[in-house]
Image (cartoon, grey):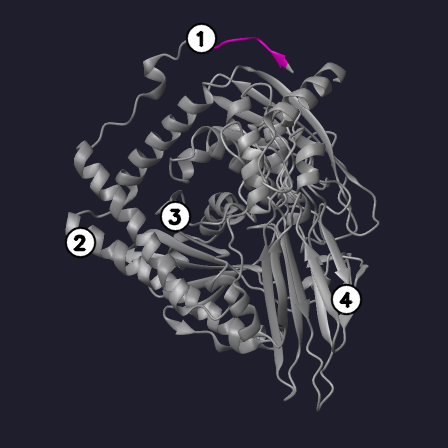
Amino acid sequence: MQSNGGKSKIAPSAFRLPSSQFDPITLEILWRRLVSIVDEADAAVARTAFSSLLRDAHDYTCMFTDSRGQELVQGTFCTPGQAGAMALGVKKIINSVPREDYHPGDVLIVNDPWLLAGHLNDVCVLSPIFFKGRPVAFTACVFHHSDIGGRVSSDNREVYEEGLFIPPIKLYDAGVLNEAVLNMIRWNVRTPEEVTGDIRSQVAANHVCSQKIIELLEDEGLDTLDDLADEIIARTEASMRTAIAKIPDGIYPYAGVIEGAGTRQDVTIKLAVQVKDRDILIDFDGTSPQVDWGGNVVYNFTYAYVFMAIKSAFDPDIPINEGAIRPVTMTAPEGTVVNCRFPAPVAARMQIGHFMTEMVFKALATATPDNIIAGSGGTPAQTNIFYGKRHNGKNWHTMIIRGGGMGASSQMDGHHCAIFPANGANTPVEIVESDTPLIVEERALVCDSGGPGRLRGGLGRKMVIRVPDDEFAPRPPTTVAVQAGRYRYPPEGLFKGGAGAKAQFLHNGRAADASGLTLCQSGDVLAFYSAGGGGYGDPLERDPQAVEQDVFNGYVSIEGARVDYGVIIDPVTAKADLNETAKIRALRKQNQ
């Protein structure tokens, strides 16, 4: 680390806000109303979406901007990879269309990875909001559509293999549906009813947001959102800069590797986090060039998880809007794996992109050790895509995302089965079995998978799925694609904390290649093991009573307590022997 030490005091004039027409109470009321509007649109998705990935795993984001395309509010449960990317991408899309070409009732649809959130599955539906004859705001909803056609594995070599590519185009023109666009989508996906149903859910969410914005303007006697947006954005920016000012100035470098898909070569990530007064610059010079498999990351998605690290660590309570992103800038050489060129394959961009948050944390570990966490087993999110045909010939298709153990922090043990830094949820077993012919035979925490430390990493999870062996009729094959990681390198601990357990993917009890497509026949069994989280601090400093409780809960075995923590547990009473524990710990510390 290179640092020039402490910071000088910040002049009050640095945070001078624009003169406001809103008193503080009115401003707070209006802000809360704006948040409730986008959250109501968010709730409309949960009620109307067809896909379990949206209804249950919540892999979508709703937001709206002011008339200039500056992001104003995102949903409370937004997905970070879409959140940061949308702040950049939606503004670009809005301003690429002349204002006179927008009409009331217009709805644009686009999934260009380089414009938005990094792969074809993230489809954006965007609508202008008209009031008194002119566009006063824009609302957008991005869904991760589990089915966008194409070959769904990690080992594609070009984006053309990965599904339907939709440039910005009007789905509705002045309120009239373009049936040709919808038909084009239907003919390029495996489950057209579900996909088009989800698109209609997006349109409905935008409609809810539009109506509520218009009601707010009418109730408050406003002609525009822009003045309110300017004040909210300025206050957000000031808050973010105040948080950054607490980080010692300096340049904090980090270099690490991420495993390639299957047996492919590792990817090297080099970054330097430069903190200068109230600004942060992240530079990725020296990072590996883009690869010939789907882990490539577009600029927006890399930025999203870099921004996620800074915001979550230093100012987690402020909203995500234009003001939040202004203090955080990023440079990444074009043609590298973190800023890939078209037509690079990008379907599995989370296998690299999700690591950006962890790597920024590692770069800042010595500067702000209390604001970061150890490596997480849910980085990257463990994604499984299943599809096939039912006995009646109808296509079925589903996608689940699975968490691993979250990394421990300076304050607490890591959560179990968390999807971090993405903000998804684990799909319930009942939903998997109702949406597909598959049977979930087991889902359980994995003992001893959490990295040992003064604070223990969260546990990984085992999930066993069987393709039914029907007695009276052969079942059509089931295709499985895995987009995941941590098979070669486990989540690392911090400050003497141990690593979590590695991930595994087994097909009929044998290790399988997670980078390609796995064809399963009737009776086949798939086992997915998520990685555990890294520990934080010296395991020999963990409270023996906490280790005793971990053993009682099944998180740590008696042998693991002895080997990893130096805690002796009586197998009969299940209690920690404090005298023997003190002796073995003292001996180990002498040998450190």
Residue 8 in the image, given as x and y percentages of width and height: 44, 8
Query: From what the image shows, is residue 31 above or below residue 4?
Result: below
Q: Which mark is residue 518?
A: 4
Q: Which mark is residue 218?
A: 2
Mark closer to the chain start, 1 or 2: 1
Q: Secondary structure at mark 3?
A: loop
Instruction: Indicate left or right for 443 with 132 as reference.
Output: right
Mark closer to the chain start, 4 or 3: 3
Of 337 and 497, nearer the camera is 497
Q: Amino acid at mark 2?
A: Glu
| Quarter of the figure with residue 383 | bottom right
Q: Amino acid at mark 4?
A: Thr
Residue 576 in the image, given as x and y percentages of width and height: 59, 33
Neighbor class of circle 3 (other Cα within 10 Å; few <14, some 14-19, many 20+) is: some
Of 165 and 368, nearer the camera is 368
Residue contact between numbered discs 4 and 1, judged by CB atoms under 8 Å: no
Q: Is residue 102 magenta-colored? A: no
Instruction: Indicate left or right for 294 with 195 as reference.
Output: right
Can residue 147 be seen here? The reply is: no
Query: From what the image shows, is residue 261 above or below residue 326?
Result: below
Residue 20 in the image, given as x and y percentages of width and height: 22, 31
Residue at figure coordinates x 54%, y 8% from the top left: 5
Give the position of the N terminus as an image quadrant.
top right
Q: Which mark is residue 8?
A: 1
Which residues, given as a range, are shown in magenta? 2-8
Residue at figure coordinates x 67%, y 63% from the top left: 464
Reading the image, the residue beneath label 3 is: 76
* Cα separation between marks 1 and 3: 35 Å
Give the position of the C terminus as an image quadrant.
top right
